[in-house]
Image: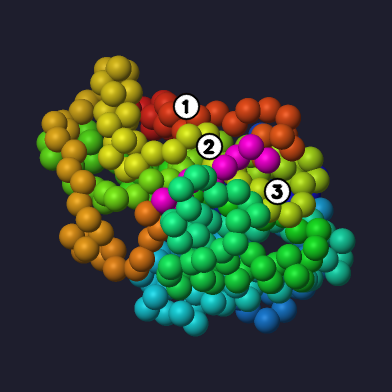
Amino acid sequence: MKVLILGAGGLTGRYLVKEAKRREMEVTALTHSDLDITKPDAANGALLKFKPDCVINAASLTRLERCEEDPVASRKINTTAPADWAKECGKLGIKFVHLGTDYIFDGIKKTPYVPEDPASPLSRYGHDKAAGEKQVLLANSQALIVRLAWVFGHGGSTFMSQLPGILAEREVVELAGGRRGSCTYAGEAARIILDLVEGDARGIFHGVQNGETTWKEFAEKAVELMRGRGGKVACREIRELSLDQIPGMKAARPAFSPLAVQQTEKFLGKKIPDWEKGLEEYLAEIGF
């Protein structure tokens, strides 16, 4: 299978490239510097040049505050461009895969969100990602959308990605409290996405790992695993802060946004590992 991966320089994109090559797929990996996916005719030109069987769009403007500050850029990257690519892929009979987010939900629900739950975003990012999902499926009814949440992995800029290093160096670690959700090791996310692609999945699926957590619970588990592996841990106290106490976190985020994976497991015919397994795999990868 010939796969074109957009946003290949991002966290999930890098793991997708690695996993696709492991599966001996023919991979074309394009970073933002290689191709601005929002430019007119970018999709048509790239599809005719590379002739892929499948396009996976891992490109996204994910920094919530940046989206609030620059809604035009957010709309172009998170809504308009994915729809344009989905449409062009549909014309040429090419599979199109778009990555979604739990931030399309408002967090009011008391049980994990299922793919069919209606979107009710709290932020510009969530609004544009929800609109992106809708427009992708309107443009291409055969498209696949895989929602991820709280992704962590090697080289990532996300807090969960950087947390092991923080725990190793700081005695007191302060982090955002008041939120519960799903999390995903980027390596497992890549496996789920490509399993769905190889199974010719269509529509909306959740690609997170089993279970739910808070940032504090995630940090506590990381400390436990790091100490069990004989790693350095300076942390002696983990403090939860409200979002308004954390500089730079001004955009609203859902307080409760776990994503249910039963439909994904049913389609794939196997159980998705718990998030703790993903954390163990990540710590082994980075040597903590």
Q: Is residue 150 left or right of residue 236?
A: right
Measure the alpha-carbon separation of dots 2 and 3: 25 Å
Query: Which quadrant of the figure has residue 223?
Result: top left
The percent coordinates of residue 196 (x first, y second) are 72, 42
The boundaries of the magenta stretch are 256-263
Please name the residue shown 37% across and 54% down the image.
Answer: 255
Question: Between tags 1 and 3, which lies in front?
Answer: 1
- Label 1 or label 3, whichever comes before in sequence order: 3
- Assign a secondary structure to mark 2: loop
Quadrant location of the C terminus in the rendered image: top left
Amino acid beneath label 1: Lys
- Label 1 or label 2, whichever comes before in sequence order: 2
Above or below, 264 against 139 in this view is above
- Nearest the camera: 256 or 13? 256
Q: Disc 2 designates what residue? A: 209
- Assign a secondary structure to mark 1: helix
Q: Disc 3 designates what residue? A: 27
Q: Is residue 268 left or right of residue 75?
A: right
Is residue 58 located in the magenta-colored stretch of the structure?
A: no
Please name the residue shown 22% across and 56% down the image.
Answer: 242
Neighbor class of circle 1 (other Cα within 10 Å; few <14, some 14-19, many 20+) is some
Neighbor class of circle 2 (other Cα within 10 Å; few <14, some 14-19, many 20+) is many
The percent coordinates of residue 246 (x first, y second) are 21, 59
Above or below, 89 against 180 in this view is below
Amino acid beneath label 3: Val
Quadrant location of the N terminus in the rendered image: top right
Answer whether labels 1 and 2 touch (C-beta < 8 Å).
yes
Measure the alpha-carbon separation of dots 1 and 3: 28 Å
Residue 263 can be seen, yes or no: yes
Q: Disc 1 designates what residue? A: 277
